[in-house]
Image: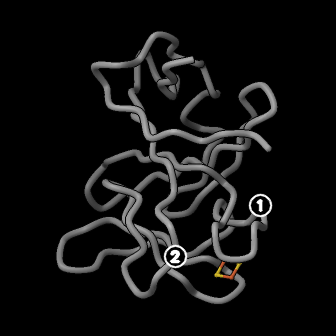
Amino acid sequence: MTAYTTTSPERVTTWFRAGHTSQFPVGAGATIKYGDRQIAVFYFHRTDRWYACQNLCPHKLENVLGRGLIGEQDGIPKVACPLHKRTFSLETGENLNGECPPVAVYPVKIENDYVYVGFAD
Ligand code: FES
């Protein structure tokens, strides 16, 4: 199975160009592919921040997190899985409302209106 590993900005070796900012929904998620990995990318318009995590929900191993609702919990940006509402921090990947394993999160940067997601492999 494809391995997803949380990647800190310092460890990034490849900034993958995921698309133009206009190709991403505002206040919601989209899914991109990097090799055989599916990555969910989110734009929080209120804070003008971008986040990325594995699209695979660790609960039932469904590729659905990019379709999840986003929001904040105590200032932490989060996504709720559309299937059974497990929520995950988009800063640490931690499951905020249960015992699921964390999701891997990835750094995102914007350059010249393009969205880049950082990977270490
Ligand atoms: S598959 Fe995501 S919460 Fe169940």
The x and y percentages for residue 88 are 44, 70
Question: Image check: 108 left or right of 59?
Answer: left
What residue lies at 53% left-to-right and 49% top-to-bottom? 53
Mark in front: 1 vs 2: 2
Q: Quadrant of the N terminus?
A: top right
The x and y percentages for residue 28 are 55, 63
What residue lies at 60% left-to-right and 58% top-to-bottom? 29
Q: Is mark 2 within 8 Å of ligand 1?
A: yes
Relative height, residue 119 to residue 42 (above, below)? above
Q: Quadrant of ligand 1?
A: bottom right
Three-letter residue code for mark 2: Cys
Name the foreground residue: 19 vs 104: 104
Q: CA distance from mark 1 to mark 2?
A: 15 Å
Three-letter residue code for mark 1: Asn
Relative height, residue 69 to residue 39 (above, below)? below
The x and y percentages for residue 41 are 56, 47
Relative height, residue 87 to residue 98 (above, below)? above
Q: Is mark 1 within 8 Å of ligand 1?
A: no
Q: Which residue is mark 2?
A: 100
Q: Which residue is mark 1?
A: 63
- Helix or strand or loop: what does disc 1 sit on? strand
